[in-house]
Amino acid sequence: MPQAVLLHEEGQNYTPTIATPAGNVIKMADGRAGIVAVDLAANQKGAIVTEGVFFVTSATGTLFAAGEDVYFDAATGLAVKAPPTATSSKIGTAAIPKVSGDLVVRTDLNAVPPTLKIATQIGYGTSLTNSAVETVIGTAVIPANTLKAGQVLSWFLQAMVLGQNGTDTHRFRVRVGGLTGAVLVDSTAINAAIYSVFLSRGEIVITAAGASGVFAGAAVSTFGANTFTSVLGAAIDTTVAQTLVLTALQGSASAGNSARTDIFNLEQK
């Protein structure tokens, strides 16, 4: 059985250096996948398909959800779930679910999963006043089983100091897993002037999904005149709902201390 069977196509010229049968999956120089449309002899000019929907051979026990990334392992000739390795590269996304026992995964070649907006807040948000306890002032819920290996969570957050009591400090953190979850960003405690702004932009990549999932990433943040970077990595259980939160902590419980969220945007892609 060929590695892929054409359903419909868009393509471009292609000339192989060795004889290549129709249906072979080719990794092009720009990183995209291509599938040979007809049998080609060495150095024969022909066509390679770069867009379309294909049945790509896959192990019966390899399951895909609709929209999940599909990788092709040149060593085995099979569609696989693993992120890129020495022999595998991404070829598209699953057009429909693949269940146990299926011999192929219907693959949208070179398709990019859509960006999903999980949370969008622009404008005055939650305020924290007169509290010396770390408190969530912005939150977004990521539903269970929606994060897959290779997917990215991208955030842009802004908070502002509205009130400053003497030498008291303000501290902002970004966490995944709620108030007690892994710390992604920590501004540290800073005696910031009134109207000082905390900004954070970052991404985490799911490197392994499941109950023993793992993520890695980075963030760049500022608080007043301070700029700091974060290199991220921790465990994450993608089989349960997760929350990304912005928290605030004030140096003392004073009515003169106040902070709020102004922007809380989180996207999954």
Image: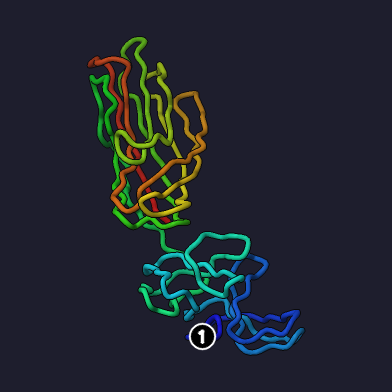
* Number of marks in picture: 1
Residue marked by disc 1: 6
Task: Give the crowd class for mark 1: few <14, some 14-19, many >=20 residues within 10 Å.
Answer: some
Q: Position of residue 18 (x, y in %)?
A: 74, 81
> Residue drawn at (39%, 49%), measured in percent from left and top?
212
Q: Secondary structure at mark 1?
A: strand
Q: Residue furthest top?
A: 166
Q: In the figure, is residue 61 to the left or right of 138?
A: right
Q: Position of residue 251 (x, y in %)?
A: 32, 16
> Residue drawn at (36%, 72%), measured in percent from left and top?
97
> Residue drawn at (37%, 10%), measured in percent from left and top?
167
Q: Quadrant of the C terminus?
A: bottom left
Q: Amino acid at mark 1?
A: Leu
Q: How is the image coloured?
A: rainbow
Q: Position of residue 26 (x, y in %)?
A: 63, 74
Q: Tell me: residue 96, above or below residue 160.
A: below
198 or 15: nearer the viewer: 15
Q: Position of residue 228 (x, y in %)?
A: 51, 29
Q: Tell me: residue 131, above or below residue 53.
A: above
